[in-house]
Amino acid sequence: MWVVATAGHVDHGKSSLVWALTGSDPDRLAEERRRGLTIELGYCWTDLPGAGQIAFVDVPGHERFIQTTLAGVGPVPAVLFVVAADDDWMPQATEHLAALDAFGVRHAVLAVTRSDLADPRPATERAIAHLNRTSLRGARTVAVSTRTGIGLDELRDALAELVNSLPRPAPTADVRLWVDRCFTIRGAGTIVTGTLPAGTITVGDQLSLGADTVRVRGIETLGQPATTISGTARVALNLGSKTPFTLGRSSVLTTPYAWHHTTTADLRVPGLGDVRRPDRMTLHVGAVAEAVHVRPLDAALARIVLPRALPLRVGDRAILRDPGNRTILAAVVVDPAPPPLGRRGAAARRAAELATADGTVDPTKEVWRRRLVAASLLRQIGVDPAAASAVRAGDWVLSREHAATLRDKAIALIRTEADAPELGLPLAVVARHLDLPEPDLVRPLVQPPLRLAGGAVVIDLDAPSPAMAALRRLIAELTESPFAAPDASRLRTLGLDEKVIAAAVRAGRLVRLDGSVLLLPGADQLAARLLSELPQPFTVSQARECLGVPRRIVVPILEQLDRTGRTRRLPDNRHTSRDEHDSGQSVAHYGRGPANH
């Protein structure tokens, strides 16, 4: 199915032309028929040879109903632009054309109606001159008469050629349905209609309505029930009788969790500097119209604040309109998730950041502007994080420039804050000092001279410091004799003070038991394995003989094993291994492993 909107000045024959093409009257209200004037959006459809089904969204041509007109043309990819052969180029034709140009509509057919009443060539030339200054340049032109039927077959051919040239939307795209009608049918429930630009909706689907969800109970398209429908299409959805009170015309239904709903966005708005007082304007996007506060960043960039959150993405086309003087400004969303503007000069700095932003999605630039951003947010605003030249860590993406800056800060931090650079600082400490939300974000920053050692970030120096040399001697001794925890005298002899020992424990180089017993990581696993080979249960003395250590060391080891569930203390003060096949590390493997420390 293809969806085409009409556009043009009131009383130039848009509705009559749709009726002639489809056999249906788009003016469904009695008031419209009485006045001969389109007031609400009308919907008709037909089958065209070589094109399939085409649905028409017929819009009002009177200036009083411009908001309804914009709701009709906003989500639609193509337009049937109508002018009359027996009339001049009129103000509403100018306003409709400006709106289509602002929305970025590039596919059109120009129909010159009432060609039986006047020579269509002057009107055609005037209209082409106007269209060629907009995105509708090059539109095919057909002179028609709904009274005599002249040109209708040619118009059908032109429409078929038009829709066949349209890009085919992806059925797998995220759904965003701008609701243009909402009503209730007794016994059925709430019905909403809209133009589905892309994606697929299936009966049973859940769709988001802001923070609420609704379930699709039924689908109708072109008057026929359907179980599934893909864009582009005109759809009517039955959402049942229990719907949120916020549901109504101008609501937006979306794929859950796929869109970023925002009340603040930065737009590129050429011509903004020419508007006298641009602070209060109306934003038209999709089928929505909302009064927004506008804060100019420079002559062509603005920050808007919306009264309610809307699902916007980079590159969305919109209109900023001043209802007072009928000014229409084209706008394109360049950032739907912008940073807050704080101190004096923030607007100018933000304008400088967005100087080259024009709504074209550039993943690398999007990450560069944000420095650090969640990949899930990038996807929600229409940016593929995998396409960015950036640094990744889990769901986070860092710009390469920001990662380099943070790496330099990490090196300086460890040199000044660590008790020994070779012992470094824990990942969590580095993350906190660098204002990173997660410790794992430090990992991709670790490049020479930085190195990960356990859970710490360390600096490799050309020559080890005295403290590190002493620590390496202790590690070598414990590698040789895993349970020979040094006493205070031995630590003094090695030249290790409490600051270095505490840093080694934080860095995961040593494990402290009972405040004073220092062992290598994994020693408790080895002890558990050796003790499991004793006849069960065993005494403290038997454990001491098995491990070859005095009571001051074996008691803290047994207490650690009891706490971690690998042994159990019995009422008679004996111990038993809870899991005799708790293998831990073999003696041979343990002897090789800690040498890497």
Image (cartoon, rainbow, N blue to C red):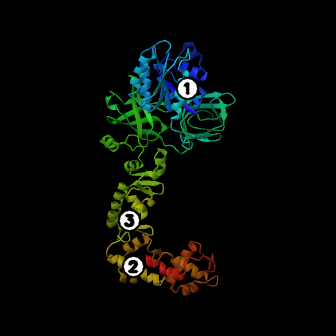
Q: Position of residue 417 (x, y in %)?
A: 34, 65
CA neighbours of label 2 inside 10 A, class few (<14), some (14 to 19), many (20+): some
Residue 491 to residue 369: above or below: below
Q: Position of residue 175 (x, y in %)?
A: 55, 40
Q: Which amino acid, by three-letter code, is at mark 1?
A: Arg
Q: Which residue is mark 2?
A: 472
Q: Which amino acid, by three-letter code, is at mark 2?
A: Arg
Q: Secondary structure at mark 3?
A: loop
- Please tell me whether mark 2 or mark 3 is closer to you in this view: 3
For the residues labelled 2 and 3, say whether their Cβ atoms are less than 8 Å apart.
no
- The label shown at residue 447 is 3
- Judging depth in this view, the residue of 406 and 312 nearest the camera is 312
Residue occupying the far right of the picture: 187
Q: CA distance from mark 2 to mark 3?
A: 23 Å
- Write down the quadrant of residue 540 in the picture: bottom right
Q: Secondary structure at mark 2?
A: helix
- Write down the quadrant of residue 269 in the picture: top left
Residue 182 to residue 297: above or below: above
Q: CA distance from mark 1 to mark 2?
A: 86 Å
Q: Secondary structure at mark 1?
A: helix
- Judging depth in this view, the residue of 340 and 239 nearest the camera is 239
Q: Which residue is mark 1?
A: 156
Mark 1 or mark 2, which has the lower sequence index?
A: 1
Residue 439 to residue 348: above or below: below
- The label shown at residue 101 is none
Q: CA distance from mark 3 to mark 1?
A: 65 Å
Residue 571 to residue 100: above or below: below
Q: Position of residue 7 (x, y in %)?
A: 48, 24
